[in-house]
Image (cartoon, rainbow, N blue to C red):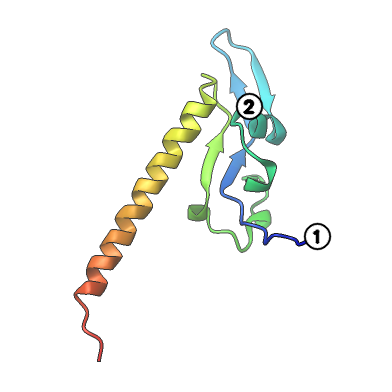
Amino acid sequence: MKHLPQRPPKYALHPGPVRSLEGDCRWIGYWQLVRLYKLHPRDCIEWNTEAPETHIGRHRSNYIHLYALFNEDYLETRLALEAETKRYKNLLLNGLKDVLEGVQFK
């Protein structure tokens, strides 16, 4: 059986406390976030702000950052962030393309 190349993670999940409108506080963990955002675990890393040494070699801008939410619109939030990230990357690529078109190579 051939092994497919592993793709890099796309999402950085930030577990954390969530306070409800009633004032109750509960912890949303990494695996709960994977399930709530409807993600595949291989597409995710846990972004631990308490232990920055775990992020060595990882640049924050390479990921879509998803957090524990009190309003529980997880899927809608994820889709909106994906669309915004895609739009931003397209703007960067188009700007780079415009710059390169103006450059003459010898």
Residue that label 1 marks:
1
Badge 2 vs badge 1, beta-carbon distance below 8 Å: no
Other residues around mark 2 within 10 Å, as few (<14) / some (14–19) / many (≥20): some
Closer to us: 1 or 94 = 1
Give the answer, above or below, for where 32 lies relative to 47. above
Say what amino acid the circle numbered 1 marks. Answer: Met
Name the residue rendered at 22%, 79% in the picture. Answer: 103
The residue positioned farthest toward the right in the image shown: 1
Q: Is residue 41 above or below residue 98?
A: above
Image coordinates for residue 51, horizontal then vertical, percent: 68, 49
The residue mark sitting in front, 2 or 1, is 1
Q: Is residue 41 above or below residue 38?
A: below
Residue at the extreme bottom of the image, as rendered: 106
Give the residue pinned by disc 2: 17
- Specify whether 81 is left or right of 96: right
At 51% across and 19% down in the image, what residue appears? 71
- Asked where in the image residue 82 lies, by quadrant, the reply is top left
Instruction: Tell me the amino acid under the disc marked 2.
Output: Pro
Q: Position of residue 56 (x, y in %)?
A: 63, 61
Is label 2 in a helix, a strand or a loop?
A: strand
Q: Quadrant of residue 7?
A: bottom right
Q: Quadrant of the N terminus?
A: bottom right
Q: CA distance from mark 2 to mark 1?
A: 43 Å
